[in-house]
Image (cartoon, helix red, strand yellow):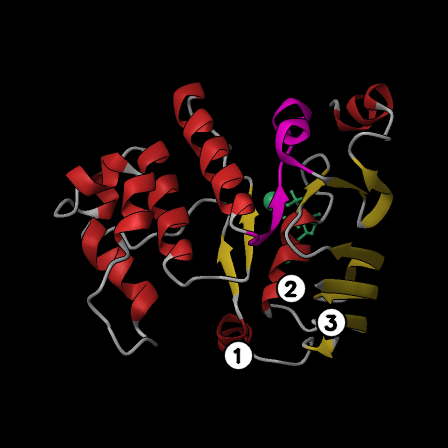
């Protein structure tokens, strides 16, 4: 579905990503792991079109997309939930959700199935995004991405700084989306969360792929070792 070959990215003359090779298979959850500062966010931002690679390619369904603009990639079905959520704090929950529909014909039609996944948002449609707790904002960011009916959902550390009860909701939502055959790329730092939902794991270390493979065959001790601070 998504395949990345020999991808390198430079930001202000520093090479941040070096020769990345990885893929996200259709209908599976691919989890990108690694400590802080290893390049995970830069990789997702490059997939979404926020950085132009200095080398290499990104193919989606066999077509090169590495030169497309972010909105063109969104139109192809890539949706992104950035690290730190980035919701609109001075818009209401409902208005935040409606921003996902700006390219649709039915600009007011919030899919009730998406809202049903996040009952708390349904109760808070008229609140300002900025007045929500971190966990509620994370749910809003995921709901907004789902309203775009993505073919690939890309999430950057959705559990970061979130309390366990909400992490459980996020896990259930990811598994529900996976059942519906949406391809998922998830950045995550906690192996215990990742191993329950990931099919494949890619581990990054200083801008490179350290190792990758099916979650079942990777050595759990070795992974925890590289992820520990
Ligand atoms: N806009 C930027 N300008 C300069 N350096 C950056 C920029 N964005 C990220 N970096 C550097 O790239 C490296 C990888 O960062 P990042 O992709 O955010 O890592 P991660 O998400 O794994 O924590 C870090 O060393 C960071 O300082
Ligand atoms: Mg990051």
Q: Identify which residue is drawn at 36% across, 41% down.
A: 139
Q: Which residues are magenta?
A: 181-198
Decide which of tag 1 and tag 3 comes sooner along the chain.
3
Q: Residue at x 87, y 25 (%)?
A: 219
**Is residue 109 in the magenta section?**
no
Taking the image as shown, residue 106 lies to the left or right of residue 5, namely left
Counting from the top left corner in percent of width and height, residue 169 is at 41, 30
Name the residue beneath numbered marker 1. Answer: 72
Say which quarter of the image contains residue 101. Answer: bottom left
| Residue under label 2 | 47
Q: Position of residue 229 (x, y in %)?
A: 73, 23
On screen, residue 74 above or below 105: above
Q: Picture coordinates of residue 192 (x, y %)?
A: 65, 22
Q: Is residue 194 left or right of residue 206?
A: left
Spatial distance from mark 3 to mark 2, Cα to Cα?
10 Å
What residue is shown with label 3? Answer: 59
């Amino acid at each position: 579905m998504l395949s990345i070959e020999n991808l390198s990215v430079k930001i202000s003359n520093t090479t941040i990503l070096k020769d990345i090779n990885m893929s996200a298979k259709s209908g599976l959850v691919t989890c990108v792991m690694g400590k802080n500062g290893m390049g995970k966010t830069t990789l997702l931002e490059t997939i979404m079109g926020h950085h132009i690679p200095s080398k290499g390619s990104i193919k989606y369904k066999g077509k090169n997309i590495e030169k497309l603009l972010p909105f063109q990639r969104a139109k192809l079905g890539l949706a992104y939930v950035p690290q730190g959520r980035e919701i609109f704090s001075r818009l209401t929950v409902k208005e935040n959700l409606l921003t996902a529909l700006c390219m649709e014909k039915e600009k007011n039609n919030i899919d009730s199935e998406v809202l049903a996944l996040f009952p708390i948002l349904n109760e808070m449609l008229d609140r300002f995004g900025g007045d929500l707790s971190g966990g509620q904002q994370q749910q809003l960011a995921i709901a907004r991405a789902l309203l775009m009916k993505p073919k690939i959902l890309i999430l950057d550390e959705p559990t970061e700084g979130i309390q366990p009860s909400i992490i459980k909701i996020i896990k259930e939502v990811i598994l529900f989306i996976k059942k519906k055959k949406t391809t998922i790329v998830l950045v995550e730092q906690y192996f215990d969360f990742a191993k329950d939902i990931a099919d494949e794991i890619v581990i990054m270390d200083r801008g490179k792929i350290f190792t990758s493979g099916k979650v079942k065959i990777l050595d759990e001790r070795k992974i925890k070792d590289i992820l520990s601070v």
